[in-house]
Image: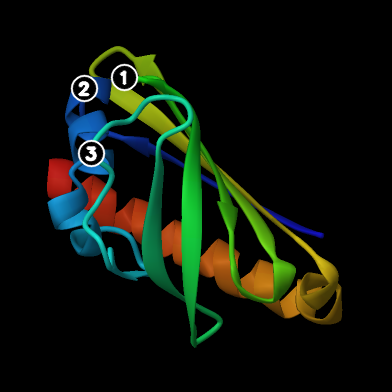
Amino acid sequence: MADVTAQARIEAPAEKIWGRLTDFDGYDQWNATHTSFPEGGPTTLEPGATYAENMKLMGFPAEVTWTVRAAEPAHLLDLRGKGPMGVTLGMRYALVREGEATTVRIEGSFTGAAVSLMAGKLKDSATSALEESLGRLARLVA
């Protein structure tokens, strides 16, 4: 298992950040691991909704099928995914209002037999990608 976390205080209201997090047409503008949605982004963000995403993890392409576990506008987006080689992924985006700013915390998890072989490298690569994504997100909503 590999767990990763990144957090940033962004000088923008939670609603504006949520708008970017859920603008799947512009996902590649801020998400450092995203390459495409082969069938388009999700049509709804409600528990049980599914969609496919092509990503690049540790420099390798991967297709992940995501299922929405929870979606609370301007507060929480929780996803569970199934990737290649039996890897299960989790991504949780939590937004906490702080006056005119918002703290955005992203938590990711990777489990499966393939993960145990490369957990350290995966953790470093994913943490770096999350931090890059938060930086891009902050610049877009500023």
User: Is label 3 or label 1 in front?
Assistant: 3
Q: Which residue is mark 1?
A: 73
Q: Name the residue at 70% across, 65% down.
A: 87
Identified by mark 3, the residue type is: Thr
Depth check, front residue: 20 or 11:
20
Q: Position of residue 68 (x, y in %)?
A: 47, 35
Identified by mark 1, the residue type is: Pro
Mark seen at residue 89: none
Mark 3 or mark 2, which is nearer the start of the sequence?
Answer: 2
Q: What is the CA distance from the residue labelled 2 to the residue labelled 3?
A: 19 Å
Mark 1 or mark 3, which is nearer the start of the sequence?
Answer: 3
Q: Give the image's coloring scheme.
A: rainbow
Q: Is residue 65 above or below residue 12?
A: below
Q: Which residue is mark 2?
A: 15
Q: Which residue is mark 3?
A: 43
- Residues packed near mark 3 inside 10 Å, few (<14), some (14 to 19) or many (20 plus): few
- Inspect this view and state whether residue 72 appears: yes
Tag 2 and tag 1, C-beta contact below 8 Å:
yes
Q: Position of residue 48 (x, y in %)?
A: 48, 31
Q: What is the CA distance from the residue labelled 2 to the residue labelled 1?
A: 8 Å
